């Protein structure tokens, strides 16, 4: 009389390998990570990372602390960074504290940001 039908919902398509995604990963204030992080989307760092981060975009929050190398298309820093940055677009907010060498294409530095290191503009 009653029969159970199988779920006919198709699985969502997967992005091909190497494709960028619109995902956003938040590393909470209570996290301390030692190691390398890779993401095809954006990463928001509110805690502490010692290692490297490779992502489409990276935001280091006001209480965020990064010690290591960053490679991302866009980087916004509100917290502290000690290490190397390779980026197309870099924004240093007023509370940013950066120590290290930076390679960029476009750069915004707000009044109050503390920076120490060598800045190199990427060749077009």
Image (cartoon, grey):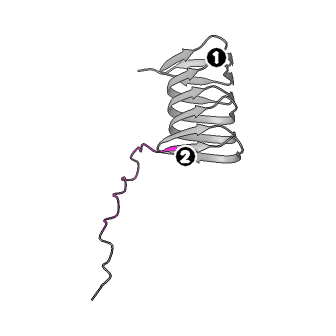
Residue 89 image offset from top left, x and y in percent = 49, 24
Q: Is residue 44 above or below residue 2?
A: above
Q: Is residue 5 above or below residue 54?
A: below
Q: Who's the residue at 31% across and 65% down the image? A: 10
Magenta-span inclusion, residue 26: no
Mark 1 vs mark 2, CA separation in Å: 27 Å
Q: Who's the residue at 55% across and 46% down the image? A: 38
> Element at badge 2?
strand
- Residue 124 is left or right of residue 117, and the answer is left
Residue 56 image offset from top left, x and y in percent = 48, 38
Q: Is residue 74 above or below residue 115?
A: below
Residue marked by disc 1? 94
Q: Nearer the viewer, residue 26 or 57?
A: 26
Residue marked by disc 2? 38
Which of the two discs, 1 and 2, labels the residue nearer the N terminus? Answer: 2
**Pointer 2: residues within 10 angstroms few (<14), some, or many (20+)?**
some
Q: How many dots with numbers?
A: 2
Give the residues in magenta. 9-24
Query: Is most of the magenta stretch helix, strand or loop?
Result: loop
* Outermost residue toward the left in this view: 1
Quarter of the image with the C terminus is top left
**Pointer 1: residues within 10 angstroms few (<14), some, or many (20+)?**
some
Residue 112 image offset from top left, x and y in percent = 67, 12
């Amino acid at each position: 009389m009653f029969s159970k039908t199988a779920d006919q919902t198709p699985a969502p398509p997967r992005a091909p390998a190497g494709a960028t995604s619109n995902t956003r990963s938040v590393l909470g204030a209570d996290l301390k990570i030692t190691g390398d992080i890779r993401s095809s989307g954006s990463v928001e760092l509110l805690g502490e990372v010692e290692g490297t981060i490779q992502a489409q975009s990276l935001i280091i929050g006001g209480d965020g602390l990064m010690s290591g190398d960053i490679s991302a298309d866009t980087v916004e820093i509100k917290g502290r960074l000690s290490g190397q940055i390779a980026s197309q677009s870099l924004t240093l907010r007023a509370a940013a504290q950066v120590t290290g060498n930076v390679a960029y294409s476009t750069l915004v530095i707000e009044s109050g940001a503390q920076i120490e290191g060598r800045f190199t503009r990427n060749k077009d």
